[in-house]
Image: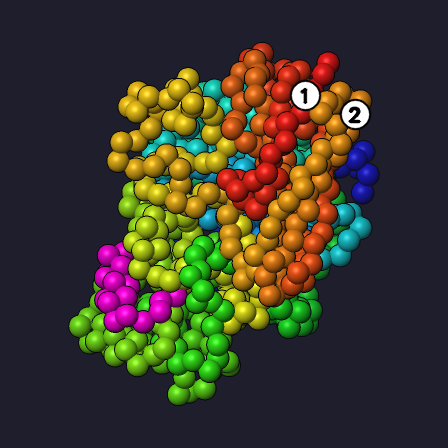
């Protein structure tokens, strides 16, 4: 159907039908749903009726080919103009085959595998009737108290942008021509990842310079890759909630960036303009949101109840409504729904594709490449002929999928004990929980200590219940629960070698863990195949290669803590620094416990012979940077070679380091490789005080190394 035909269809629509396209309701509202439940109450509370539902344009949360086809069939029979429904869901890190949480995926520094994971999620979702996923979430995160850090790929602008592109390619691809793809929706616009105090839905207050320099680029990267939709953030920005923020949404997103896709509110965010204090009632909330450019209102009824009235009284122009409807119709056409309202929903393919062996293997591979080895005092990898005690609340837990994995199932999840039993004899593997997540009994503790006392090595599987992170999972205390730390210390007192394996959705304060364990493995929430991936790492079947995408704080008192910070006028380590009157804590270090980009391997990698092709660069030049990386260990291993740049003098202050490139390489024992990067003038640009994006002549340092702190350095000058 051509754009002209879309416009012709729009002309045939009544006001009620147009407004209906702007409404998104959850699955139970629709006839044909598996369980409509007690929908009468919610319908009354929202002041909507069955006629409103018939006009509704999109469905939230439906999945399964049978259910989506049932809902679509009934809807098409009742739709006067034959306009199909859009089915949308939160497919964040897997549909039924669950991959590691995005923060873990960021630690892989492997955008190819990230793209593959999104493509698999899209395939499973598409055959189950889903058309749109609310992903990727690209909010820059620097405060681990915020529960939703698990949904981001970390603290670095460049890394976030690269993963944003990869996820959009995987989910969406060539939406017009590729099979089994879904439209992606980048979120949350904008700066949702910087709430005050790390508290969800809280105030965000930052300068336009900070916003443009650090927080906006990843959204822009997703849109440049062709992302079809944008979701608004819950927070305020410049004092205005994003869902009603016309300068942000119309000004930057639509006018400056030229985005003409569909914008959707987050759940209930239009109505929340009232408690925010910028709208007096639902009528004003509808006015503000539509004027800001929000096309679809998710799960509140301000539009359906008030947009027609606002147009009739002249407060809103009908062309604003028409623009929104036309964008939605165009997306439905792009997805092919007018030709086939059921699209790829297919019960037979659904049964074949979901949780296939290939999908499970991809989940296992990405999980193993996302697990970060934080400490290893010559204990790992383990030998299968050792007697091992597997102790802790995650020893046999299926709660390793993580938040936003609603399609995953516990029965499909490989636990750590299940995986280790495939490698160890019954005599050599003892399993005892010792504690639950936040409490314990004397009997549990006694059983765990008895098992540990019989073992050669103790593996402690510790961490956060998945409800302790994710949306609304904000925490002021980011240590492990006290009962788990107590178990760790009691096991340590037995004098046995201890491996701590951590399952969590945020960087934690791990000082007590690192002090009481010989090896520390950060597994995050590794997904459906998580148990196998952990076993692969522990036994050395996979050599760890992941690097932290978010700094691990020394203490919660440091946060927000991030590697690419700015120098002050009184830096702590300046040659003429005083003992006291410098920017420092008196009781803890300034530096995190583990910095961005950090991660160990069972191999050792030596960096040498850093060279640059010239000591100067101009806008017309390309500077070549090379380094020799040697695997000095006994095992083949993969290393993520990282390149950072510092601009020493700028019109505004510049970060101490900024990641500009990385490359994952594989080296055999004793093997060396020359890794070469290219630097251009474009990579040296930044936002000036007048928001102009350009570079300045002057001195720069390029750093190359294994993490953001352990680097080699060379200087060059940019000449204008």
Residue at 57% across, 63% down: 543
Q: Residue 621: which disc? A: 2
Residue that numbered label 1 is attached to: 717
The mark that comes first in sequence, 1 or 2, is 2
Q: Is residue 265 visible?
A: no
- The colour scheme used to paint the residues is rainbow
Residue at 24% across, 67% down: 493
> Is 520 contained in the magenta span?
no
Residue at 64% across, 71% down: 356
User: Residue 121, image x and y in percent?
Assistant: 62, 58
Depth check, front residue: 43 or 564 = 564
User: In what element is the residue under mark 1?
Assistant: strand
Query: Residue 581 appears in which quarter of the rendering?
Result: top left
User: Residue 212, image x and y in percent?
Assistant: 56, 24
In the rendered image, the vertical position of residue 282 relative to residue 23, given as above or below: above
> Is 485 contained in the magenta span?
yes
Residue at 42% across, 23% down: 574
């Amino acid at each position: 159907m051509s754009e002209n035909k879309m416009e012709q269809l729009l002309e045939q629509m009544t006001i009620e039908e147009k407004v209906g396209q702007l409404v998104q309701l959850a699955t139970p509202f629709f006839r044909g749903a598996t369980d409509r439940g007690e929908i009468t109450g919610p319908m009354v509370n929202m002041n909507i009726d069955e006629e409103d539902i018939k006009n509704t344009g999109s469905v939230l949360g439906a999945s399964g080919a049978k259910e989506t086809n049932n809902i679509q069939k009934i809807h098409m029979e009742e739709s006067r103009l034959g306009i199909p429904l859009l089915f949308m869901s939160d497919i964040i890190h897997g549909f039924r085959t669950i991959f590691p949480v995005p923060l873990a995926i960021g630690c892989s520094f492997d955008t190819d595998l990230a793209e593959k994971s999104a493509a698999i999620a899209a395939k499973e979702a598409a055959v189950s009737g889903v058309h749109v996923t609310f992903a990727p979430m690209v909010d820059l995160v620097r405060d681990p108290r915020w529960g939703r850090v698990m949904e981001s790929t970390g603290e670095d602008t460049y890394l976030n942008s690269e993963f944003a592109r990869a996820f959009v390619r995987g989910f969406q691809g060539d939406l017009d021509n590729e099979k089994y793809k879904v439209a992606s929706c980048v979120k949350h616009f904008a700066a949702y990842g910087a709430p005050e105090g790390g508290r969800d839905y809280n105030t965000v207050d930052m300068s336009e310079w900070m916003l443009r320099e650090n927080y906006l680029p990843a959204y822009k990267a997703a849109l440049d890759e062709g992302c079809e939709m944008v979701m608004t953030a819950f927070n305020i920005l410049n004092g205005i909630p994003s869902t009603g923020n016309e300068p942000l949404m119309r000004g930057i997103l639509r006018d400056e960036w030229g985005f003409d896709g569909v914008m959707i509110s987050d759940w209930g965010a239009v109505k929340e303009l009232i408690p925010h204090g910028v709208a007096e009632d639902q009528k004003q909330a509808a006015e503000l949101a539509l004027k800001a450019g929000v096309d679809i209102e998710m799960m509140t009824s301000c539009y359906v109840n008030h947009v027609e009235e606002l147009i009739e009284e002249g407060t809103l122009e009908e062309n604003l409504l028409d623009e929104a409807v036309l964008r939605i119709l165009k997306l439905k056409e792009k997805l092919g729904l007018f030709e086939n309202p059921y699209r790829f929903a297919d019960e037979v393919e659904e049964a074949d594709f979901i949780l296939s062996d290939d999908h499970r293997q991809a989940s296992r591979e990405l999980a193993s490449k996302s697990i970060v080895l934080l400490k290893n005092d010559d204990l790992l990898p383990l030998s299968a002929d050792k007697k091992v005690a597997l102790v802790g609340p995650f020893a046999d837990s299926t709660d390793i999928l993580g938040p936003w994995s609603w399609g995953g199932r516990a029965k499909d999840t490989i636990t750590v004990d299940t995986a280790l039993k495939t490698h160890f004899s019954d005599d050599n593997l003892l399993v005892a929980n010792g504690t639950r997540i936040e409490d314990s009994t004397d009997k549990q503790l006694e059983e765990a200590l008895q098992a540990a006392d019989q073992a050669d090595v103790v593996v402690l599987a510790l961490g956060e219940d998945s409800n302790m992170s994710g949306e609304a999972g904000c925490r002021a205390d980011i240590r492990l629960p006290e009962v788990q730390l107590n178990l760790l210390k009691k096991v340590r007192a037995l004098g046995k070698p201890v491996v701590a394996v951590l399952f969590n959705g945020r960087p934690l304060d791990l000082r007590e863990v690192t002090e009481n364990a010989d090896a520390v493995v950060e597994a995050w929430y590794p997904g459906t195949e998580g148990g196998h991936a952990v076993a692969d790492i522990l036994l050395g079947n996979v050599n760890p290669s992941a690097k932290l995408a978010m700094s691990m704080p020394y203490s919660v008192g440091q946060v927000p803590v991030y590697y690419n910070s700015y120098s002050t006028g009184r830096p702590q380590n300046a040659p003429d620094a005083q003992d006291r009157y410098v920017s420092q804590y008196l009781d803890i270090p300034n530096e995190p416990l583990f910095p961005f980009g950090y991660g160990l391997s069972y191999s050792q990698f030596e960096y040498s012979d850093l060279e640059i092709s010239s000591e100067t660069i101009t806008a017309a030049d390309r500077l070549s940077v090379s380094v020799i990386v040697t695997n000095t260990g006994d095992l083949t291993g993969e290393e993520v070679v990282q390149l950072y740049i510092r601009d020493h003098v700028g019109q505004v202050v510049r970060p101490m380091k900024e990641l500009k490139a990385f490359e994952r390489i594989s080296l055999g024992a004793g093997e060396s490789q020359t890794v070469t990067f290219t630097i251009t003038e474009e990579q040296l640009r930044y936002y000036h005080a007048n928001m102009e994006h350009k570079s300045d002549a002057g001195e720069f340092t390029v750093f190359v190394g294994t993490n953001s702190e352990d680097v080699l350095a060379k200087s060059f000058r940019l000449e204008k």
